[in-house]
Image (cartoon, grey):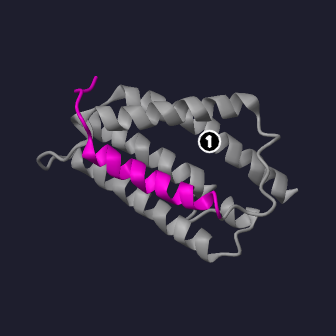
Amino acid sequence: MGHFGFSYIGLVFWLMLIIPNLMWTRHQPKEYDSRNESKVLVAFERIGQVLVTCTALIFSDFNLRSWSAWTLWLMAAVLLMLLYEVWWIRYFKSKKTLSDFYSSICGVPVAGATLPVAAFFLLGVYGKVIWLLISVVILGIGHIGIHLQHQKKIKH
């Protein structure tokens, strides 16, 4: 279920997520338009963002503990977050087009949405916190769904 307490690992993951997104607000693709996004997907995304943020920070189960097979889940989550940072670096060095923003990396489609969702899911597995897993599924439905809709529009 989870043990209440501050998670410094959750904070690191959250910072790895939020800092590039804040930078993106000044470097959005010129053609970016969120006005026609599905209201249902936006609702899932917003609710998921709040739930994931809160859950990642308030359960100490995500913090480091002695080595076990479960540590592999944390290592996988960290690798996905590092790949997410690489994706952002590639985006910021690009021409910042919609194609750049909805691009894949290492075969991961719409990597800017998929990688952090998958990383937080694996963090939830590592911490054995069902609340983060549920929160991430809600976020993923909205966030990945919106990105896939945008990607579909630019491919047509």
In this rendering, the count of numbered labels is 1
- Magenta span: predominant SS is helix
Q: Which residue is mark 1?
A: 143
Vertical order, 26 against 92 (above or below): above
Q: Nearer the viewer, residue 132 or 14?
A: 14
Residue 9 % position (x, y): 28, 48
Q: Is residue 21 magenta?
A: yes
Choose top left, top right, bottom left or bottom right for residue 79. bottom left
Residue 89 % position (x, y): 53, 71
Choose top left, top right, bottom left or bottom right for residue 143. top right
Q: Is residue 14 magenta?
A: yes
Residue 112 % position (x, y): 58, 56
As helix, strand or loop, the secondary structure at mark 1 comes to helix
Figure quadrant of the C terminus:
bottom right
Task: Please report the residue visible at 58 percent of the width from the left and 50 percent of the height from the top.
Answer: 113
> Is residue 10 left or right of 133 when viewed as pictured?
left
The outermost residue toward the right is 156
Q: Nearer the viewer, residue 19 or 112?
A: 19
Choose top left, top right, bottom left or bottom right for residue 100. bottom right
Task: Please report the residue visible at 67 percent of the width from the left and 40 percent of the height from the top.
Answer: 145
Provide the residue span drawn in magenta. 1-26
Q: Is residue 116 visible?
A: yes
Vertical order, 75 against 6 (above or below): below
Q: Nearer the viewer, residue 138 or 25?
A: 25
Task: Please report the residue visible at 71 percent of the width from the left and 28 percent of the height from the top.
Answer: 40
Could you classify mark 1 by the number of other residues whose Cα lies within 10 Å: few (under 14), some (14-19), or many (20 or more)?
many
